[in-house]
Structure formats: C-alpha cells, structure tokens
Image (tube, grey):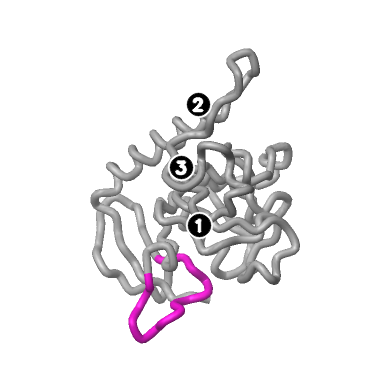
Amino acid sequence: ASGKNVLKKGSNGWTCMPANPRGMSDPDNGWLSAHEAMPVCFDAAGLDWMEGWMSQSKPVMKRDSYVWMLAGDMGEDNSTPMTMTQAEANGTWIESGPHLMLFPKDPESLDSWPDDPFKGEPYVMFKGTDYAHVMIPLPGYYAYSPADKAPKGFGGSAVAAEPPPAEVPFTPPSLLALGFALGVAASLAATRLTVSRLPMM
C-alpha cells in the first residue's frame, strides 16, 4: 500500500497494521492500547480487501482471504460500513474482542448467512454491501459487550458458548474450533510478517 511506514520488514507475504479509522485518541502519546489500535493481519488477498475499504471503493480480490484481529475493534454498526460511533449507528452496534474474519472474493456468496452478532457463532458483518465478510468469534470476543447481550458462557474470558441439550443439533462449536485452529496456524505462519503503519482515513 502506498504511503506505508514499515516498522519491521517480513518475508512471508503477511502484513499487520493498525486499522482504527478514527485514529489515535491521544496522538501525542500514541495508541492507548492494542484494542484502540485495532491491529489487523492479512495476506496479499486480504490487502486487496483492505485497500478497497480504506479508499471506500469496492474491493477487487483474486480469492477469499482469512484475516485476524486478535485485539478486537472499537465498535462497528453491523449493517452499515464506516459508522464511527454508536450514536450514529442505524443497526446493531458491536464492540468486539478477538476474532478471525473471512473476506470473500464474492460478497454476495454470504447473502444467505445469518447476521446476528450475539449468538456466539460466525456471522456476517455489513451484509448486502461490497464489504460483507464473516466474523468468527474467538475466546473473549464478547468482553466489551453488555452482559445481557453476550451469549451465556461466551462473554469475557470464556472459551466457548455453552451448548444446548445433546438432542438439539448444534454446529457453532465446531466452527469456532475451526476458526481458532486457523488463527493459531496463521499466527505460527506469520512469524516473518511485515508490520506496517498506514495513514488513517
């Protein structure tokens, strides 16, 4: 990406950068926390999506990409991209903890996916837009959510949603386990990633 300030050069094609479009709340002293910085890590295909997002244009991707934000984010309107505050939100506001994301080459492929962020399972953010993507909660995902909204057993530092009785079909835990495994694998693969500081919008 043009204009980036590379803090540490890597060799495996992965890049990490702060992704908070609001910028620093205290520019004189830098990011107050990793959560405020909203660091995101991605490969080349994920960069294609990020460049579309930062330029507010439709991402053009050659393939799907898994991306992760292990410090979470400062909050999003789950239905409307580029909403900076909860007061401006028209849809469901969610401030998230650690999660993986799936950026699809074709966002319309997610049109039939659920988009409720408070069920403790993968869901679609920005459904029906050029920026639609899958959010995959990891342990601690609901640490910033109101207690009455966080799924039972999945708030704060919990490791998984509490499953229903055995006779009720229930698939999210396996998806969450897959998401967590992918996150671990990606983390191990990213030991030679590039750490960058890009200008915020």
Q: From the viewer's perspective, is residue 142 above or below residue 82?
A: above
Residue 39 lies, in percent from the top left, at 40, 61
Residue 111 lies in what quarter of the image? Answer: top right
Q: What element carries label 1?
A: helix
Give the magenta part as a residue range: 18-32
Residue 24, horizontal then vertical, whole percent: 44, 77
Question: What residue is pinned by disc 2?
Answer: 174
Question: Magenta stretch: dominant SS?
Answer: loop
Horizontal arrangement in the rendering, residue 159 relative to residue 195 (left or right): right
Identify the element where label 2 is drawn: helix
**Residue drawn at x 41%, y 56% as measured from the top left:** 71
Q: Which residue is drawn at 24% across and 49% down?
A: 191
| Magenta region includes residue 181 | no
Question: Could you tell whether 91 is left or right of 19 in the image?
Answer: right
Is 24 within the magenta?
yes
Circle 2 packing at 10 Å, graded few (<14), some (14-19), many (20+), is few
Q: Is residue 125 left or right of residue 193?
A: right
Q: Which mark is residue 48?
A: 1
For marks 3 and 1, give the one nearer the viewer: 3
Is residue 178 positioned above or below 29 on the image? above
Determine which residue is flagged by label 3.
Answer: 138
Q: Earlier in the sequence, mark 3 or mark 1?
A: 1
**Could you tell me how far apart the alpha carbons at marks 2 and 3 are, in whole angstroms?**
12 Å
Looking at marks 2 and 3 on the same chain, the residue that comes earlier in the sequence is marked by 3
Q: What residue type is labelled 1?
A: Asp
Q: Which amino acid does label 2 sit on?
A: Ser
**Residue beneath the point at 58% across and 15% down:** 166
- The residues tagged by marks 1 and 2 sit, at their Cα atoms, a distance apart of 29 Å
